[in-house]
């Protein structure tokens, strides 16, 4: 039918009713579109109070077990004036609780924040739009930043905040990426993160990988090396991982094994980096992974505990490189680590990796510190009579005396001066066994190994690792 203005007579009241109907229809359509493509509903904005605290509107809880496959979304095309992709601007770290305050969003750009939160903690993430455009924020694993890989998503429109309840599927870092639905125009926003449940949990940005030294100790046997430490850290909210290397072998062999496990752990945890906490030879293995094997871009911090960074005289004496009872020292070492049944060659390779001449003249020059990695160290201090705060275990008193004569204070296996590396934190009242809670959690009265490893994890957390 042809349009005839003479046949369309609408009085003022009818016109107002028609306008209202059109407005409501358009608004409902926009809300439906937003709710269909996003995992959170919009809430009316209530000013500063609402920006910092959800006002009880409808939200959707998202957990690692309940995530549905995300839909693929189109990036702005060349016709939009912003090219094929938006400029990604890295922003700061977001802990819980935190708020970004007012943030300008530049034209043709998206922002990436680094949210750090522990598993089992229930979060409320709120997005507030300060411009005139609809904004979208997605939560992603760091190794899967694409829109199609999002774990969850929320939206906000002018006057309407989006709030998402989110339970992290694992502890650590997530990307929170914010963009405008109309990227051709500059906009603005604010993000706040609050804890709703399990707010006493805490975690580091990256998983903590525990790396052992010699295992197979005759008096320890199959008992967990870092005794009860992984379970305790996980209960607190951290994400601990445990490397499993040859019980004793050269640094070259063990570091190769460690590098392979670092790759697997990064993939399994969807992380970009790891923090390493290493005991004894495990510290040398880790340093070689970082330097010679080129993993400095994947390790955020290395904490070494009683690592012989300059070797240990007990290895030199056992191999006849220093004066002393070589035969007795070698027999002591082989017996200590239970190296028998055809494994003596692996043990000898390990001893050679710990001699002062090898570590100082070959290993250290070949494995300089990587400036991207934070190096931190502790070591134990023990003695025979206990006047130093700890009484050396009977099993290693013989070695303590040999090392004491050759290099001074030690933990029964490693001289104190040899263990100093990077940001040295000092000594702990513990021998080489006490440092890892052995045997079976029994340590000296002045040292609690569980509390010690909690303090190590907390230090990594406060330093942003």
Image (cartoon, rainbow, N blue to C red):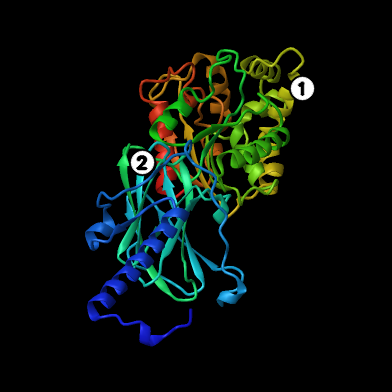
Q: Quadrant of residue 321?
A: top right
SS at circle 1: helix
* Position in image of residue 434 (x %, y %): 47, 23
Instruction: Say if 1 sits above or below 455 in the image.
Output: below
Q: Residue at x 36, y 41 (%)?
A: 122
Q: Residue furthest bottom?
A: 6
Q: Residue at x 44, y 60 (%)?
A: 136
* Position in image of residue 280 (x %, y %): 57, 31
Q: Residues within 10 Å of mark 1 (few under 14, many from 20)?
A: some
**Direction from residue 237 to residue 395 in the image, left or right:** right
Q: Which mark is residue 84?
A: none
**Direction from residue 364 to residue 154 in the image, left or right:** left
Q: Nearer the viewer, residue 275 or 364?
A: 275
Residue of label 2 = 122
Instruction: Say if 230 sits above or below 375 in the image.
Output: above
Residue of label 1 = 345
**Direction from residue 109 to residue 155 in the image, left or right:** left
Residue 56 seen in this snapshot? yes
Q: Nearer the viewer, residue 285 or 94?
A: 94
Using the numbered discs, state the Cα–Cα distance from disc 2 to disc 1 in whole angstroms: 52 Å
SS at circle 2: strand
Q: Residue at x 39, y 51 (%)?
A: 40
Instruction: Say if 168 sits above or below 281 in the image.
Output: below
Residue 310 seen in this snapshot? no
* Position in image of residue 68 (x %, y %): 51, 43
């Amino acid at each position: 039918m042809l349009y005839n203005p003479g046949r369309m007579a609408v009085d003022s009241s009818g016109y107002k009713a028609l306008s209202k109907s059109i407005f409501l229809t358009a608004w409902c359509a926009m809300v439906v579109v937003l709710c269909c493509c996003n995992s959170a509903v919009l809430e009316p904005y209530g000013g500063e109070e609402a920006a910092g605290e959800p006002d009880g509107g409808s939200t959707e809880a998202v957990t690692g077990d309940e995530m549905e496959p995300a839909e693929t979304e189109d990036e702005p095309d060349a016709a939009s004036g912003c090219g094929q992709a938006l400029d990604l601007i890295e922003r700061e770290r977001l802990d819980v609780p935190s708020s970004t305050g007012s943030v300008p969003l530049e034209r043709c750009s998206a922002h990436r924040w680094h949210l750090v939160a522990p598993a089992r903690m229930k979060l409320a993430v709120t997005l507030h739009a300060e411009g005139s455009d609809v904004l979208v924020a997605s939560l992603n694993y760091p190794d899967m930043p694409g829109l199609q890989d999002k774990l969850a998503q929320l939206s906000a429109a002018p006057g309407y905040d989006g709030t998402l309840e989110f339970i992290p599927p694992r502890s650590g870092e997530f990307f929170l990426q914010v963009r405008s639905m109309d990227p051709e125009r500059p906009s603005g926003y604010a993000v706040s993160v609050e804890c709703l449940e399990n707010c006493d949990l805490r975690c580091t940005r990256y998983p903590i990988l525990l790396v052992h030294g010699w295992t197979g100790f005759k008096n320890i046997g199959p008992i967990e090396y870092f005794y009860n430490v992984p379970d305790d850290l996980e209960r607190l909210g951290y994400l601990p991982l445990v490397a499993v290397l040859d019980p004793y072998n050269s640094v070259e062999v063990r570091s190769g094994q460690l590098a392979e496990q670092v790759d697997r752990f990064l993939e399994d945890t969807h992380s970009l980096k790891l923090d390493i906490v290493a005991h004894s030879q495990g510290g040398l293995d880790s340093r070689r992974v970082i330097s010679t094997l080129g993993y400095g871009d994947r390790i955020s911090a290395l904490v070494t505990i009683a690592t012989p960074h300059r070797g240990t005289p007990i290895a030199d004496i056992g191999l006849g490189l220093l004066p002393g009872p070589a035969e007795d020292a070698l027999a002591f070492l082989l017996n200590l680590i239970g190296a028998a049944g055809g494994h003596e060659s692996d043990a000898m390779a390990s001893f050679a990796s710990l001699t002062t001449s090898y570590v100082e003249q070959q290993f250290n020059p070949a494995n300089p510190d990587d400036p991207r990695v934070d190096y931190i160290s502790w070591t134990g201090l023990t003695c025979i009579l206990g006047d130093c705060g700890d009484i050396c275990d009977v099993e290693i008193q013989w070695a303590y005396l040999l090392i004491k004569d050759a290099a001074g204070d030690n933990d029964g296996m490693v001289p104190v001066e040899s263990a100093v590396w990077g940001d040295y934190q000092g000594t702990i009242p513990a021998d080489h066994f006490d440092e890892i809670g052995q045997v079976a959690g029994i340590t000296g009265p002045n040292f609690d190994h569980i509390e010690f490893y909690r303090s190590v994890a907390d230090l990594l957390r406060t330093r942003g690792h």
